[in-house]
Image (cartoon, grey):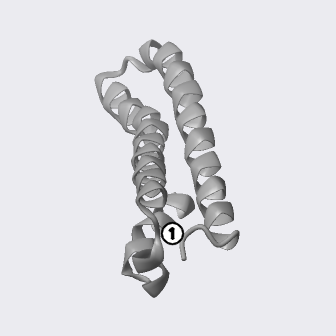
Amino acid sequence: MALLGFLLILPFTAAFARFSHGQRGLFVTGLVLAAAATAVLLAPDAWQVVLARRRQQDCGSRSAGVTTVLGLAAMSLAASAAVVLVLSYARGRGA
């Protein structure tokens, strides 16, 4: 969620105006992946509450494992996109 927060702040900085078209595309990709990862990683907790109220807690363990793997994969891709974005900006491609 911290990565998502930093990415949400980035468009409001002066440096964002100097981003190239490719860097903006990379930014949008990273932002969408970070938002999706956050949603997918939080979903098992919300689903656990729903199942607990229905007294069916054992039904959610398989889906929790799948969503965790998907969320971690999306977060890895989002972090990679953020690193590539920072490195491309630092090398002067955004000027």
- Which residue is located at x 64 percent, y 72 percent? 92
Instruction: Indicate the quadrant where residue 20 lies.
Output: bottom left
From this view, report whether residue 10 is shown above or below residue 37.
below
As drawn, the residue found furthest toward the bottom would be 14
Residue 69 location in percent, x, y? Answer: 59, 26
41 or 88: nearer the eye?
88
Closest to the observer, 58 or 7: 7
Q: Which residue is drawn at 53% across and 36% down?
A: 74
Q: Against 41, is 59 above or below?
A: above
In this view, the residue in front, 43 or 76, is 76
The correct choice, above or below, for 33 with respect to 31 in the image is above
Please give the name of the residue rendered at 49% of the width and 26% of the height, measured from the top-left corner.
67
Which is nearer the eye, 21 or 16? 21
Residue receiving disc 1: 6
Q: Where is residue 36 in the image (x, y as percent from the top left)?
A: 41, 41
The amino acid on which the numbered mark 1 sits, given as a three-letter code, is Phe
Q: In the rendering, at what x and y percent does residue 63 appear? A: 46, 18
Residue 4: x %, y % from top left:
47, 59
Using the image, determine if residue 41 lies above or below residue 67: below
Q: Residues within 10 Å of mark 1 (few under 14, many from 20)?
A: few
